[in-house]
Image (spheres, rainbow, N blue to C red):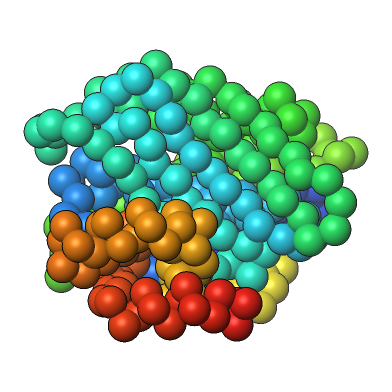
Amino acid sequence: MTHTDQLHRYLFDNYQVRGELVQLADSYQQILSAQDYPQPIKRLLGELLTATSLLTATIKFEGHITVQLQGDGPVSLAVINGDNHQQLRGVARWEGELPDSASLGDLVGTGYIAITITPNEGERYQGIVELSENSLSESLESYFAQSEQLKTRIWLFTDLEGTAPRCAGLLLQALPGGEAEDYSHLEALTHTIKAEELLNLDAHEVLYRLYNQEAVRVFDPQPVSFQCTCSREKCEQALLQVGEQEAQEVLKEQGEIVMNCDYCGNNYRFNETDLQTIFSSPDTLH
């Protein structure tokens, strides 16, 4: 039985190679519950969530990360936001009907992945890589080849057929100073992973099956969670930016102001009394 919503880092005692394994359920399900997503977008968000978790653990920083897909296809945007504590949220926007069999190229069309890191201290950094029509993992492998100059392989899986959606992934990366043959050996072992194994087995069981002939050091797992940053206070600040006159016009037209969070599905409602409080004492809002 898997201990879900955890990320495991591991090292090989005899090789300059590191790995990461992540298995997600609750955090993935909370992202999907915010909107009525078509099946192919559910799969895309699962892969993107898994990939972002792996990236966040691989890139050393303290702050926030955004992994965003944009293109000219029916899915105009798919994005996961998170931080170094593995607190993640995500959303996608699309138009029209999408067949269940739609590929990444069918969904996003010609596009790119933008990976933006905003550290708590220091300058913001953004890396952009062309989106491969074949797979998200292939695109991210290209990102590492360009930005980090490190050999990296990524495996991403989702399961929408079981009792509850799940997703999982593996990352294998060569470290500086390692031998190419060592990495190739471990890559071949890792490539034997099956989706049902990674999605359903305990992480330590997965690693044993893959590397039972190797000396593997597994670190304590890091919890992964869904975390939305929306709040009523932020909505009040947004209304202040809109201005009292325009807010009153919307209120008069609609009877109330409803602000919806695309990330978690929460609705924040404001009536005449709420507006009077907001605009009579704006300095008290934080």
| Image x and y of residue 158, in percent | 31, 52
Res. 186 in view: no
Q: Nearer the viewer, residue 232 or 185?
A: 232
Which residue: 16% across, 68% down? 255
Query: Which corner quadrant holds the N terminus?
Result: bottom left
User: Looking at the picture, does residue 270 appear above or below residue 145?
Assistant: below
Outermost residue to the top: 110
In this rendering, would 90 be left or right of 43?
Answer: right
In this rendering, would 24 be left or right of 55?
Answer: left
| Image x and y of residue 71, in percent | 39, 24
Which residue: 71% across, 68% down? 217
User: Looking at the picture, does residue 190 appear above or below residue 36?
Assistant: above
User: Looking at the picture, does residue 151 appear above or below residue 261?
Assistant: above
Task: Report the number of discs.
Answer: 0
Which residue: 31% across, 62% down? 248
Query: Which corner quadrant holds the C terminus?
Result: bottom right
Choose top left, top right, bottom left or bottom right for residue 180. top right
Q: Nearer the viewer, residue 270 or 101?
A: 270
In this rendering, would 169 be left or right of 144?
Answer: left
Q: Nearer the viewer, residue 186 or 274?
A: 274
Which residue: 25% across, 36% down? 94
| Image x and y of residue 47, in percent | 39, 47
| Image x and y of residue 164, in percent | 20, 69
In this rendering, would 95 be left or right of 203?
Answer: left
Res. 246 in view: yes
